[in-house]
Amino acid sequence: MQQPVFKLLAVALMLFIHCEVAIAQLLLQPGDPPKQPDIPVFYRGTLMDIEQAIAKLQRGEVAQIATSPGGLPVYAVYYGEKEGFKGQANYNSAVAAQNPAFYARKGADTKPVVYFIGPVHGQEAEGIVGLVNLLEIAETGKDLRGKAWPELGEFFHKSRVIILPTGNPDGRRRVPYDTFVGLPEETMTKYGQGTKKDGTLWRWPHAKALHPMQGDVGILGAYFNDDGINIMHDEFFAPMADETKAIMKIALEEVPDITVSLHSCSCTPFVIQNAHAPHFMKRRIDDFARQLNNRLISLGLPNRGSNWSLKVAPEDEQFPPRSSFNLVSALHHASGTMAFTFESPHGTIEDGTSYEQILDIQLTLYEEIFRYVMAERLLWE
Ligand SMILES: [Zn+2]
């Protein structure tokens, strides 16, 4: 439930963000394709859409967990009572004592905890669309198309759920398009990873070669907050971004059983392995990834084909190293959570995914996450 003052502030902030977004929309450059005129009403992936979803929450409790360098709020929405877990040590000390229960006692009498981290890369708004629809399902049982998701709705009664609609509002605000559905991948790359001063594109993965992204910057890519920090690759032992600190703090305090960091590319959907998690956890992530892929196949949604699986082999034998200790690795080692990255299609010309399919992929992912945690939960006793 919310206080009237909070609602007033939310409306004022909405107007402010609306103006800011209007300014950003003026920033289309000569040669950029025009914005899509026909985005469906259920496809809500902007900061304004997050504000509107939050303003009408009845069941979920909202908190502002950080303020971005650009002055924007980062929100978390909570469902279900928080368990005490009776911890007496931090996670890595508890592991050194050979039982994570010293960090958190998670018996069968406790509810599982599920942590959804919305896009930390501002151009990857498909996760916002999914989470805004998930909030609607948590509140009403139906998505914004009016489609009922009874199983998803029921999970909210059996779990503690934390939803961050976006982890990087600064980056989101800088994107002049509400979505990249039907646009060239090149346009997404220009605004996603940004450009150098001479107008050439930074591209993936070279956009990670300069961090913080400061100096040779024409368009600052939506990968970054307004300070040029890529939250996926922050300095986790001394975080530079308040957004990162807030994301990590929730993991430490909430002890999620499962955590997903939502991303997108011009691709079919897939889970990325957590390169620096222990092998037992990599096997779980591979099991989950194949289960999700099989479900996408059975639903006729974009998928990776029936022979696809993740590597569980030790990537740390490679030199030079290629698999970074990133946000999901840090989340696992801080809290024991089964943390992984999910990549959704953007709907670009190259990946050809539709608005409907993108929303179905997101909601199917969420349903599979809940199913997995209910069936395969690790108890710490
Ligand atoms: Zn990403």
Image (cartoon, rainbow, N blue to C red):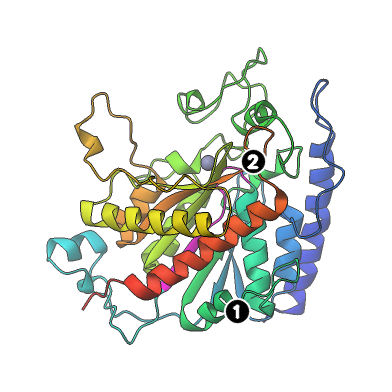
Is residue 123 found inside the magenta-colored segment of the image? Answer: yes
Horizontal side, residue 156 vs residue 285: left or right:
right
- Which quadrant holds the C terminus? bottom left
Magenta extent: 113-124
Q: Which mark is residue 210?
A: none
In the displayed image of the protein, which residue is found farthest to the bottom?
109
Q: Secondary structure at mark 1?
A: helix
Answer with the quarter of the image where residue 57 lies.
bottom right
User: Residue 314: image x %, image y %?
Assistant: 21, 40
Regarding residue 81, the answer to whether it shows in the image is no
Q: Secondary structure at mark 2?
A: loop
Q: Which mark is residue 150?
A: 1
User: Residue 285: image x %, image y %?
Assistant: 34, 55
Q: Residues within 10 Å of mark 2 (few under 14, many from 20)?
A: many
Please report whichever mark, 1 or 2, sits nearer to the chain's N-terminal start.
2
Q: Which residue occupies 52% across, 37% down?
A: 229
Task: Give the amino acid at mark 1.
Answer: Pro
User: Residue 220: image x %, image y %?
Assistant: 64, 29
In the displayed image of the protein, which residue is found farthest to the right?
37
Task: Give the amino acid at mark 2.
Answer: Gln
